[in-house]
Amino acid sequence: MTGEYEHTLDAKGRLAIPSRLRDELGSVFYVTLSMDRCLSAYSSENWQRFSDKVDAMPFVKQRKMRPLFAFAARCEVDGQGRILLPQNLREYAGLEKNVTVVGCNNHAELWDSAKWVEQHAIEMTPENIAAVMEELEF
Amino acid sequence: MTGEYEHTLDAKGRLAIPSRLRDELGSVFYVTLSMDRCLSAYSSENWQRFSDKVDAMPFVKQRKMRPLFAFAARCEVDGQGRILLPQNLREYAGLEKNVTVVGCNNHAELWDSAKWVEQHAIEMTPENIAAVMEELEF
DNA sequence: ACACTTTTCCCCACTTCTCCCCACTATGTA
DNA sequence: TACATAGTGGGGAGAAGTGGGGAAAAGTGT
């Protein structure tokens, strides 16, 4: 998944999924918390893989993973390609009106547009790109 | 199982099961004690798996598991999707009126809403989320 | 054994919210 | 210009959650 897409959250808390990402996410996918006060969306297959991984962990470790499940939402896209984003997730990520959807290879991230602009400014410098490529050994 | 759902315990001690979790828990499931003064609900299949696991343990260890069985309740959901929660379990978890049901991958947890808010505040910080994701390597 | 209380369970009624559908606009394409 | 696709907004049917009445079942005491 690639690209950044600016969308708006309507009064009912619905968010349109960019058509470019719709195929890759599928008609049912999962949204949960992520770092930096953003949300991550995973396709059903990736979520299942993740869920199985946690299932195989010892009990005490499973408990630490709780927030990722407690705040996860199973989202079904409606006829217009939108999902209904639960309130608690919107609050966590500070989503009000303008939301930027960012393609991140195996998942998509949802950012408050203003926050994304800041993050974006940090990540998009030639210095940072150089550092990234270094790390990549590509 | 995912998501957090706020519900109310009525005067008769009945608790509505969130419709999103109903399919996964089934029409008959098991509720027992858990850590942090909360209750855990397991589907019949998962309860069986748990029970088998304990069965395979040495005798002395099995004895230590006793409270989990002694206080477990077999719950059947009624026509309106509710269960009747035994008094002793309600007391253990301090459930009075407002209950939060939390989806935790392979089980659901029942919390007094006020207690959950505290727990929630600890787990939901970006730092904790970052630590969890690190551990998971996902 | 009987009456009486308490608990459990089934049914109905009301309110709220989710989800489905239709309509409008903007943008891009032939 | 006509057409298709993507994104946005809103109305309304139906589901979900909540509360309460009353019959059946279980427990208690005389």
Image (cartoon, coloured by chain):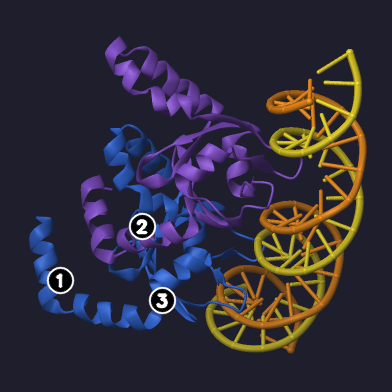
Chain colours: A blue, B purple, C yellow, D orange
SS at mark 3 in the image? loop
Nearest the viewer among B91 and B49 is B91
Instruction: Give me the residue at 20% from left, 79% from top.
Output: A122
Which amino acid lies under the numbered mark 1 shown in the image of this protein? Ile
Label 2, label 1: how far apart the Cα atoms are: 38 Å
Name the image quarter holding residue A94. bottom left
Which amino acid lies under the numbered mark 3 shown in the image of this protein? Gly
Number of residues whose C-alpha sits closer than 10 Å to that of mark 3, classed few (under 14), some (14–19) or many (20 or more):
some
Instruction: Give me the residue at 55% from left, 30% from top.
Output: B73
**From the viewer's perspective, is the residue at label 2 or at label 1 nearer?**
2
**From the viewer's perspective, is the residue at label 3 or at label 2 nearer?**
2
Q: Which mark is residue A129?
A: 1
Are tags 3 and 2 found on a single chain? no
Quadrant where the C terminus of chain A sits is bottom left
Instruction: Give me the residue at 33% from left, 57% from top.
Output: A105
Subunit of label 2: B
Which amino acid lies under the numbered mark 2 shown in the image of this protein? Gln
Q: Which mark is residue B119?
A: 2
Q: Are marks 3 and 1 in contact (CB under 8 Å)?
A: no
Instruction: Give me the residue at 34% from left, 17% from top.
Output: B63
Nearest the viewer among D2 and C2 is C2
Give the mark, 3 or 1, whose residue is nearer the N terminus. Answer: 3
Q: Position of residue A128 (x, y in %)?
A: 13, 73
Q: Which residue is mark 3?
A: A94
Label 3, label 2: how far apart the Cα atoms are: 20 Å
Nearest the viewer among C24 and B110 is B110
State whether residue C24 is above or below residue B32.
Answer: below
